[in-house]
Image (cartoon, coloured by chain):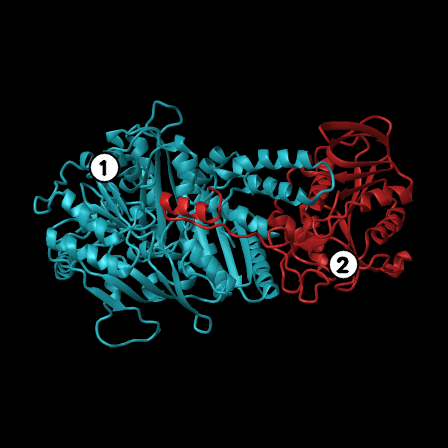
Chain colours: A red, B cyan
Amino acid sequence: MSALRILVPVKRVIDYAVKPRVNKAQTGVETAGVKHSMNPFDELSVEESVRIREKKRAPGGVEDICVFSAGPPKAQDVLRTAMAMGADRAIHVDVKEGEDLEPLTVAKLLKAAAEQQKSNLVILGKQSIDDDANQTGQMLAGLLGWPQATQASNVEFGEGDTVSVTREVDGGVETVRAKLPLIITTDLRLNEPRYASLPNIMKAKKKPLEKKTLADFGISAEKRLKVLKVTEPPARQGGGKVEDVDGLISKLKELGAI
Amino acid sequence: MSGRPQLAPVLRRLRLARTARATPTSLSRQAALQQSLARPARCFSNSRSQCFQKTPAVAAGQAKFTSETYPDIKRDARFAQLTEDHVAYFRGLLGSESAVLDGVTNSNAADDIEPFNTDWMRKYRGHCQLVLKPGSTDEVSKILKYCNDNMLAVVPQGGNTGLVGGSVPVFDEIVINMSRMNQILEFDEVSGTLVAEAGCILEVADQFLASKGYIFPLDLGAKGSCHIGGNVSTNAGGLRLLRYGSLHGTVLGIEAVLADGTVVDDLCKLRKNNTGYDLKQLFIGAEGTIGIITKVSIQCPQRSPAQNVAFFGLESFDQVQLAFREAKGQLSEILSAFELMDEGSQALVRQVTGNKSPLEGQYPFYCLIETSGSNADHDSEKLGAFLEDVMEKGIVVDGTLAQDETQIKSLWAWREGITEALSHLGGTYKYDVSIPLKELYQLVEDTRARVDAAGLLGDTDDFPVRAVVGYGHMGDANLHLNVSTRRMDPRVEKVLEPFIYEWIAERQGSISAEHGLGVMKKKFIGYSRNPTMVGLMKNIKTTFDPNGILNPYKYL
């Protein structure tokens, strides 16, 4: 069996624990001064790649784990985090702040990257928690002409380059099998990402991080979609408190409920 | 920030479940997943009262009456017995039905009164039959005047989250619960001065301040239930003391009612006020023995936009001290917490929560460092350099640095979850002490050796003591020594007391660093305060409360 060369795309997004706020111009959410971190689904992909190597699950072994991110210079922070978790090296494609790439552009970029890096397995988060598109993995599989196993909750390697992936679907699980090269997108139950340890955080600072531009991959950031308006969902009407049973009864009467 | 309630992986899973909410696939499955994942997280809320209600297994059966646990405390015969006339007066005064819980004339009210009679750990239980919930300072004043004239004893009560039985009655004292006085009255966005009523819940105040870009200078595990009036009355310490100092410094003024109904209006909003005796300081930490605090004005610092948390394992207490010195030196102004935990305490958290430790290996000691500052890049650069340095010098063996907000919360849960993990396992003897840093952990080792030598400590059910653990606020030389037991056994207490108090007195330590004295440490005040000091305290008490109706049978 051929050795695995895993490509793990990761995205820097607004931290899951931060409540996003719509900007004044209603063109998007406020990102300045807001805490960012790695997309939680991408953490699962990094963790899974590292586990495949550590647990020696692939018969041909893991030759390379390369993390890949397109975004502003700060995206290098999440690449370092991924390397602290166990990835070997990183590629950062510089994209200006605010110049977000659409899923199709990202898929084209990843196609070029997968070919250039001679990857035979791409593990992606099934979606990023900022735009929730859930499209990139599928588009990438289409562009490359590779098989895809989305929403993976378990990944097993068999003889002759085969990979069995358990997917979470409506009403249960579905197990699919395909041969490498392959696209896998990750779902919640796949694993529980680790904490990066201090020694590994330090080692990660010395791991190679290549800086590239979109032009290096022959891609331009064209927009096919136009955002018309971004608004917050309507605020929930707060409940009221009553002092006692009499208060409750008079309130209900007031509302005409009794 | 809504606190750091949940414990690590539970939250991590929950977080992922929540991120999945927007997924286009299979809504029903996600709903089921959220439900199943949300369930275990719930019981690890950090609000004490919540945990209390949702995990009834914690305290099987009723608590013993304090009067039975401490048979040498006798009811003071000077105090009058409650009569129907008294109740009728209070009803007339407070008007609304919900403000008076009356067990004197209504025998069905016992269940309603029980929560006010018992503390959250169910260690102390009184015989109170009347709970009053005043809604204004004026009502507090009228209640106290009436009680003083009729020789009725009272216990002021906030969120009832105390650890020493100070907020529950011993005999039939009337409980004056402050929960209806819960308004935030005023906030100055320029100076950061907050004025609020005593019954305002700490977390509510903190969230209000967060929306203004400020922070309450006090943070503690019980923030979801405790009242700021109670915090001031007990001079609570907590997690932010290292950074923002004690309440003696941050409280600018208070309004309190004395035993005879006199309203002491010292609601100063200024930082500087050198005009005679600073009497408000007497109320801070008095545990309700000289007056009832009704309003508080407090200086709130600016909330730091950038926070980082590191968690690491160390081989010895000497190295913990070295790490603390390095942290102070290198992180100086951004260091906001330095917490210590021993392996014993972390093993109990692992056992109760089933969570995986943030570090691969196990170490005798763990430290949690938090930094707060105004510039995230500056802070992480400093913290990074510090971590590299302590790793290279071999002070720290292993560690991790929170990579996102969720990891910050889950790392904190390893420290904040200890109290709760202990309460799930059975009774705990808790000692909250302050000792010179050099010998801070020696107390845990000496106590463990002593319990072991008495043949009480072991891994099986034959031994009454499960573990002797230590953790606490290293930055404030404040240690929490906890002895986790499987069952009540009088031998355990004999081994622990007065040994621990004598040990502390020998080193000029404090037998109560931040929890107060209450009923629990009534007998032991002499180990930390000499007779002259106790005598002066008694004089002050008599001046403010000549009839002694305020929180009797407690430390004075």
Q: Quadrant of residue B63?
A: top left
| Spatial separation of the CA atoms under disc 1 and disc 2 | 69 Å
- Residue B83 picture location, percent across and down: 14, 43
Q: Eyeballing the image, is B246 above or below A147?
A: below
The amino acid pointed to by label 1 is: Asn
| Closer-to-camera residue (B399/A126) | A126
Q: Which residue is mark 2?
A: A71
**Label 1 is found on which chain of the structure?**
B
The residue lying at 52 percent from left, 55 percent from top is B1
Q: Is residue A106 visible?
A: yes
Q: Which residue is mark 1?
A: B106
Residue at the left extreme, as displayed: B78
Can marks 1 and 2 be said to lie on one chain?
A: no
- Residue B290 picture location, percent across and down: 20, 58
Which of the two marks, 1 or 2, is nearer to us in this view? 1
The residue lying at 14 percent from left, 60 percent from top is B536
Q: Eyeballing the image, is B126 above or below A89?
A: above
Crowding at mark 1 (Cα within 10 Å: few <14, some 14-19, many 20+) = few
Q: Is residue B553 visible?
A: no
| Closer-to-camera residue (B509/B302) | B302
Is A223 on the left-hand or right-hand side of B490?
right
Q: Eyeballing the image, is A196 above or below A154?
A: below
